Amino acid sequence: MDTVPEENVSATLTVAVPSSRVYAVLADPTTHASIDGTGWVQEAVDRVPLTEVGQLFRMDMYHPGHPNGDYQVFNEVQVADPPRAIGWRTGYDPQGDGHLEFGGWFWRYDLTPLGPSGTEITLTYDWSAVPQSVREYLRFPPFGPEHLGNSLRHLAEITGPTPRP
């Protein structure tokens, strides 16, 4: 992927599932590895549903370009507005002492209900708060353009169609 002049990328997909169902899947950290379009997210360490701004949840990750390959991130919920929006910023614990640092990137899902059984989902990855010092060694976005679309398709598969009576 070439340099992106904006500091965020988005993708949108419409699904035949109520927004409350989509939100519930997104608020469950145990589903995130299945949703991820890159294969980097491995497993939820914290398995409690995401319910409030400020809540932290850890994820085990893998990236071949990471110095250790396997690593762990801390995510802090920044938006929790069921069933319309959920989002988090990603950070880490560099010293292992509980003092978290956040890199300046943010994931957000906006859900627009389309009647009782449809939802338009927009996934946005925003790196506008990434400091220049981080941009010197990490490229943004750190994934190809297909990642967001892959994630939305995975989310659609997980939520499944609404059963008809």
Image (tube, rainbow, N blue to C red):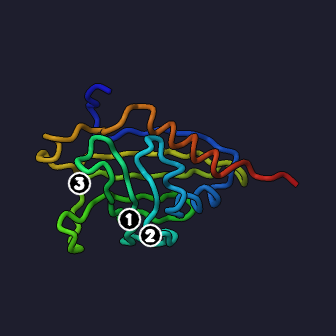
| Depth order, front residue of 103/8 | 103
- The tag on residue 58 is 1
On the image, the x and y values in percent for residue 87 come to: 42, 58
Residue position for label 3: 103
- The tag on residue 106 is none
Quadrant into which the C terminus falls: bottom right
On the image, the x and y values in percent for residue 96 come to: 22, 70
Disc on the earlier residue, 2 or 1: 2
Residue position for label 2: 46
Disc 2 residue type (three-letter): Asp
Q: Find out whether the residues at labels 1 and 3 contact each other: C-beta distance under 8 Å.
A: no
Q: Judge left or right: residue 132 versus residue 43.
A: left
Residue at 26%, 51% (x, y): give it. Answer: 68
Disc 1 residue type (three-letter): Arg
Residue at 70%, 45% (x, y): give it. Answer: 16
Disc on the earlier residue, 2 or 3: 2
